[in-house]
Amino acid sequence: MTKIIMSGCSGRMGKVITDIVKADQDAQIVAGIDIVEDETLGYPVYSSAADIKEEADVIIDFSSSKVTDALLEYAVEKQLPVVLCTTGLSDEQLENVKKQSEKIAILKSANMSLGINTIINMLKTATSVFCPAGFDVEIVEQHHHNKLDAPSGTALALADAINEAADGQFDYIYDRSTRREKRGTKELGISAVRGGSIPGTHDVIFAGPDEVIEIRHIAYSRSIFGNGAVSAAKFLAGKSSGMYTMDDVIQAQLS
């Protein structure tokens, strides 16, 4: 039985994961962290991690970047692994994540779905074929109107996978409204759309001479992220310190 602390338990993803774990005989949420107390969740909710009394094996974090540093401090103190799903972290916070991973196991992913993480591997191959042939690359992401950060963490993860495969040659361009010039060959455009209740759509476009290749992922339900987070929590519990990815979870499931 994997005992979980759910950070951001009263949010949309927190409630999705709560429902998933309720139906899982191998996992249990023993406590939650949120500024909003929801008595329907079925476990105690604390406004601060420091107040938690329950013993746990791992933390799943779907909260806000505002509390990430404090959460990691608590995790290090209690020696708890963290599945870090919160996006919008600053460069300083990302550096802190790496530093704390020397003390605890941290699995950081902007997107927990099996589909997106498989696409990331596909993009590395596509980049090695299309970019030397002069193809331009654009990423367009769409999300619901309540999403705070733009572009999405997933869009940046897709861009980073492409740029890594291209030996870091691309510059990310987020806005062309002030640019009156031809598109540069080393540009990687990232555009964000916000509206309605869109859970998440990501399109990667490789545009070359006389042909266009598009790779699309559509999230029809937030449960795909919740299932991935729970699988990651089970995988990470008991792991030694270091940085882990969803690819580690996928490989463990295949072995």
Image (cartoon, grey):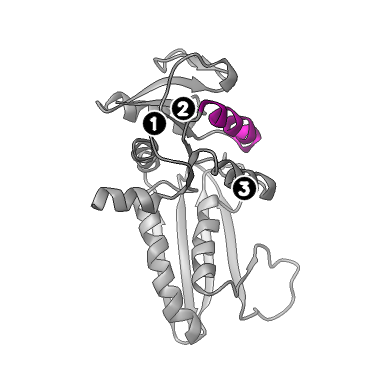
Residue at 36% from the left image edge and 38% from the top image edge: 223
Identify the element where label 1 is drawn.
helix
Would you name the residue on which mark 3 appears?
94
Label 3 vs 1, first from the N-terminus: 1
What secondary structure is the stretch in magenta mostly built from? helix
Amino acid type, callout 2:
Met
Vertical comparison of 53 with 140: above or below:
above
Q: Are marks 2 and 1 in contact (CB under 8 Å)?
A: yes
Amino acid type, callout 1:
Ile
Compute the Cα span from label 3 to label 1.
Answer: 24 Å
Q: Which residues are magenta?
A: 64-78
Picture disc at residue 17: 1
Would you name the residue on which mark 2 appears?
6
Reply yes or no: does residue 65 show up in magenta: yes
Position of the N terminus by quadrant: top left
Q: At which x and y percent is residue 120?
A: 42, 61
Label 3 vs 2, first from the N-terminus: 2
Q: At which x and y percent is residue 146?
A: 57, 39
